[in-house]
Image (spheres, rainbow, N blue to C red):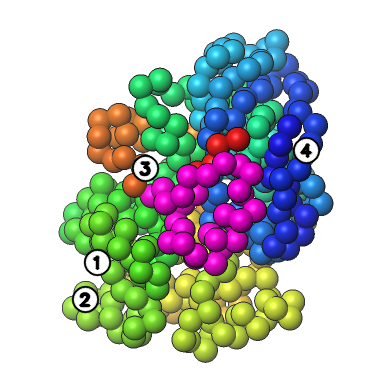
Amino acid sequence: MKALCWHGQSDVRIDQVPDPVLKHPTDILVQVTSTAICGSDLHLFDGYMPEMKNGDVLGHEFMGKVIDIGSAVQHIKVGDRVVVPFCISCGECWFCQNGLTSCCDNSNPGAEKARKLMGHAPAGLFGYSHLTGGYSGGQAEFVRVPWGDVNAFAVPDHLTDEQVLFLTDIFPTGYMAAENCNIQQGDTVAVWGCGPVGQFAIRSALMLGACRVIAIDNIPERLQMARDGGAETINFEEGDVYEKLMSLTDHRGPDACLDAVGCEAHVGPTLDAIVDKAKTLTMLGTDRPHVLRETIKCCRKAGHVSVPGVYVGYVDKLPFGAAMNKGLTFKMGQTHVHRYLEKLLGKIEDGTIDPRFVITHRVKLDEAPEMYKAFRDREQGCIKVVMTP
């Protein structure tokens, strides 16, 4: 089959690889009908994620048609049209039973390596390094999905792929990030990063009752999309973000600050961002945490900081004293996608949101290498790419 494979930093290619097969009685096979490039994929493309291997199949946002099932699969049938959460759940461990599926204890074959780095291992993830299991991803023609009854979610035929594809990751991720802001009536939420997750976080914060959302970015197309979603905007290249936020909030600061950027913060006009870039280029640092520092500085006292942006290793010069003395609450993590599927499907079906708003490019899988570069370099107004095998 055709699949997009990783061959090193900034080097992804369409290769011919063996078709997946059922390995366990609980597996299913899915023929991919739609897949997408996620901002998190760029951390692999840019070489930030450790334990990638030559030839790894990428992609964790995908959906399709079930073409085969293992002998123990009970609820999913051949022919079902399904979306597949990016985090893999066994459905049986303590974490899965408590709705914390991105922390599954049983789905990560790379758990021992992850424990040495993190203390505990996260769940297995599709197409996202051997620290998270080394599973082949969905930027391919076919995918093996383990624990198929748990990790395949049937969707109705009256909704198009483009309406439901983002249930696999970015819609639940934006929603959980907004939920982690502990939004109360009248709150102001500031969102750093107007990429796909940031766009869903903006709309989700408003759904959850935020009075105002202020979005921070520097790309005109992203800022316009944020305004279209109901946000006020700040271009961080046009002045000091802290001063602008203080002016917009009567100098109290936003009630919640949301970092939808993560470890590859833009190298803007601030000294710390320039130093972060230099450190990562010389292997003296693993992440560029400028945005995380700025959220801590800007958030009001006793406010909330939500971090859906992916971080890889150790962040430097974090103003933890400010966070402690201001009494900030932090919530973060990979998204527990499974717990949000029914709720967010309902919001799509009742017209509360049409996720297609975020799509800017529709291409064939063969064009994936070019689109990774366009997405990374913010060319052609590229915000979200959907691909068909």
Q: Position of residue 175 (x, y in %)?
A: 38, 47
Q: Quadrant of residue 29?
A: top right
Of badges 2 and 1, the one in the foreground is: 1
Q: Are marks 2 and 1 in contact (CB under 8 Å)?
A: yes
Q: Between residues 189 and 382, which one lies in front from this camera angle?
A: 382
Span highlighted in magenta in the image = 358-385
Q: Amino acid at mark 1?
A: Glu
If the image is split into quadrants, where does the C terminus sit?
top right
Q: Which residue is mark 1?
A: 232
At x 51%, y 74%, the residue is 266
Label of residue 356 in the image: 3
Label of residue 248 in the image: 2
Of badges 2 and 3, the one in the foreground is: 3
The answer for how far apart the CA atoms under marks 1 and 3 are is: 21 Å
The answer for how far apart the CA atoms under marks 1 and 4 are is: 46 Å
Is residue 154 shown above or below 114? above
Q: Position of residue 326 (x, y in %)?
A: 38, 75
Dot 3: element: helix
Q: Which residue is mark 4?
A: 16
Single out the residue that lies furthest toward the bottom. 271
Q: Position of residue 41 (x, y in %)?
A: 60, 54
Q: Amino acid at mark 4?
A: Gln
At x 35%, y 80%, the residue is 241
Q: Amino acid at mark 2?
A: Leu
The answer for how far apart the CA atoms under marks 3 and 4 are is: 30 Å
At x 71%, y 45%, the residue is 14
Mark sitting earlier along the chain (4/2): 4
